Image (spheres, rainbow, N blue to C red):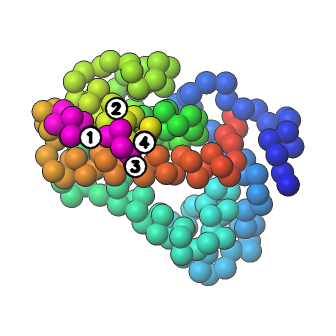
Amino acid sequence: MTTITDYPALRRPDAFTQRSLGWVPWAPPVPEAELTAAQRDSLVEPDRATNPYFRLLARDPEALRARTLTDLDIFHNDDGGTPRWERELAAAAASRVNGCVFCASVHARAASRLSGRGDDVQRLLDEGVGARVDERWDAIADAAAALTATPAAFGAEHVERLRAAGLDDVGLLDQISGAAFFNWANRLMLSLGEPEVV
């Protein structure tokens, strides 16, 4: 069985970052040249075949396809709801709470790029979800953190606060979906490998 000590030379990030990171799996992914038609189809986007994480998940193509379509719908569906950067903020906050440095980097980078608020996003990474920015930001981060800690910690007070910050029903669904999905996705990624500075 492969353990973390099998990768002593791995350049692990020493802090949360917005830099692009690599990811090293602890179990062998399907080699890109050996992906079956069903596995390639499950990637949804062909360029994901270069990513070892998605090639590892391709060992269960039906689950990967469902996972990818859910991810794309939550983060790329512009049919109403909250701006994409706020969904990315929820995912970054969940990832920060869970300690998933890789996912936090991906979603923090997207939130920065889409919002133009790179300094605020970096505060979230540096200080955690308790960093206070403004009421709408804080409501999103706090709701994501509560949902991530345990679903039972998310309650009516979070919904009321999000509504007071201007979110409608579709916006609430976006925020809850973004945080909940990445709470799950972080735990999956954390159990299968680790980030690497590239």
Q: Is residue 197 left or right of residue 155?
A: right
Name the residue beneath numbered marker 4. 150
Name the residue beneath numbered marker 1. 155
Q: Which mark is residue 83?
A: none
Name the residue beneath numbered marker 2. 141
For the point 49% across and 32% down, the residue is: 96
Q: Report the magenta residues as a range.
A: 150-162
State how far apart marks 3 and 2 are (Cα). Answer: 12 Å
State how far apart marks 3 and 1 are (Cα). Answer: 14 Å
Amino acid residing under circle 4: Thr
Position of the C terminus by quadrant:
top right
> Which tag, 3 or 1, sits closer to the chain's start?
1
Name the residue beneath numbered marker 3. 180
Q: Position of residue 104 (x, y in %)?
A: 51, 37
Amino acid residing under circle 2: Ala
Q: Position of residue 166 (x, y in %)?
A: 13, 36
Amino acid residing under circle 1: Gly
Given the current orientation, which residue lies at the most extreme front position? 152
> Which tag, 3 or 2, sits closer to the chain's start?
2
For the point 48% across and 64% down, the residue is: 67
State how far apart marks 4 and 3 are (Cα). Answer: 10 Å
Q: Position of residue 26 (x, y in %)?
A: 76, 52
